[in-house]
Each structure stands twice: as structure tokens, then as C-alpha cells.
Amino acid sequence: MSSVYKFCPRCAAALELRLLGGLPRRVCPDDACGFVHWDNPAPVVAALVERAGMIVLARNHAWPEKTFGLITGFLERDEAPEQAVAREVKEELDLDAMAVDLIGVYPFAQKHEVIVAYHVVASGEIRLNEELAEVRLIALDKLRAWDSGTGFAVRDWLQRRMAHS
């Protein structure tokens, strides 16, 4: 389990580990309280951003040099994934989403997330927010997938693109 809950956030009782639905869950032993920490993964949106015929890959300040990826962010409460991905592209790159098409949904167990990935055609001038250190513009024919996280969405998008050309 990814969380480190030890005590109930409602009544402060020590949580017990029980099987619920075939999975171990941290549960409050006080039946009157009823708290269960379900420990569900967080939903994340990812944007494979296409601008002026190039793919925009970004490097977060926290990442090692030469490590680039898609634009990502958490889905907010009451926000549709399509709105979230357009918002993230605007916040991080200052680009306007012109078209948003679902690529797929991918588990990302390493970070306890579920990634909802989109191809986003965007316009405008790139201006990085404080999260990003730099971007790279990659020609469509030079883009290559990687074997983790959002790389699977890149792989699927490239395969669909090849099938339709």
C-alpha cells in the first residue's frame, strides 16, 4: 500500500489492516466511525502537445538534465479530463488548446497514479511557467516512445499515426 496512514483521520484510533474486496485496506476498528482508507490512485492528465507541426517535450526543474516528457498535471475536483489537459497546457506552456483527442488511459503504479493521455493541438507562443526548466521541439518523424509513464501514450499515438498515414 502506498499510504502511511497509521491513525484514523476522523477519531484518531490506530488503523487495522483488513482485506476488503480482496485487497488490504487500512480500516478504523471503531465500527461507529467506519473510516476506510481506500488508497485509490490519483488521476493525472498528460498532453502530447503538437504546435506548428512539432511535438513539445518539457523538462521539469526537478528532473535530471536531458530528461524530457509530456505536459502533465493532476485532475482537479469537478473538472473534466479534457478541460484539465487544456488547462495544464495553458498553465505550463501558455499555449491554447485548439483540439484535444484522447490517446488512452494508463496505470502508473510507480507514482500511484492513473494517466489519462491526450493529443493536444495547440497554438500560441511558448512561455514556460515556474515548474519547467526547458522545452524541446521534436519533429513528428523524430519522436520516439519511452518505456515508462507517459511513454506508453506516445507509443500508442505514434502507432495510430502510422496506421492512418
Image (tube, rainbow, N blue to C red):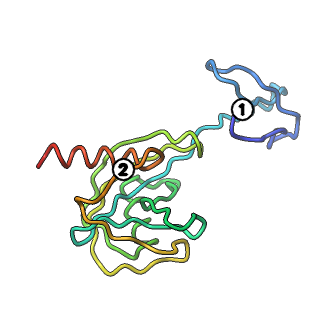
* Image location (x, y in percent) of residue 122: 28, 69
Q: Give the residue drawn at x 28%, y 57%.
A: 100
The residue under the point 28% across, 48% down is: 157
Q: How crowded is mark 1: few (under 14 residues within 10 Å), some or many (20 or more)?
A: some
Q: At numbered mark 1, what does the secondary structure look like: helix, strand or loop? A: strand
| Quadrant hosting residue 99 | bottom left
**In front here: 81 or 65?**
65
Front residue of this view, candidates 93 and 79: 93
Which of the marked residues, 1 or 2, is nearer the chain's N terminus? 1
Percent of width and height locating residue 15: 83, 32
Amino acid on which disc 2 is placed? Ala
Q: Position of residue 92 (x, y in %)?
A: 46, 71
Residue that numbered label 1 is attached to: 36
Contact between marks 1 and 2 (CB within 8 A): the answer is no
Residue that numbered label 2 is attached to: 145
Q: Label 2's element? A: loop
Pick the residue in front: 5 or 58.
58
Mark toward the viewer: 1 or 2: 2
The one of 14 and 136 positioned closer to us in this rendering: 136
Disc 2 packing (10 Å; few <14; some 14–19; many ≥20): some
Which residue is drawn at the image coordinates 42% and 72% (left, top)? Answer: 135
Q: Quadrant of residue 56?
A: bottom left
Q: In which quarter of the image is residue 142?
A: bottom left
Q: How many marks?
A: 2
The numbered dot on residue 164 is none
Amino acid type at circle 1 is: Val
| Residue at the far left in the pictured view | 165
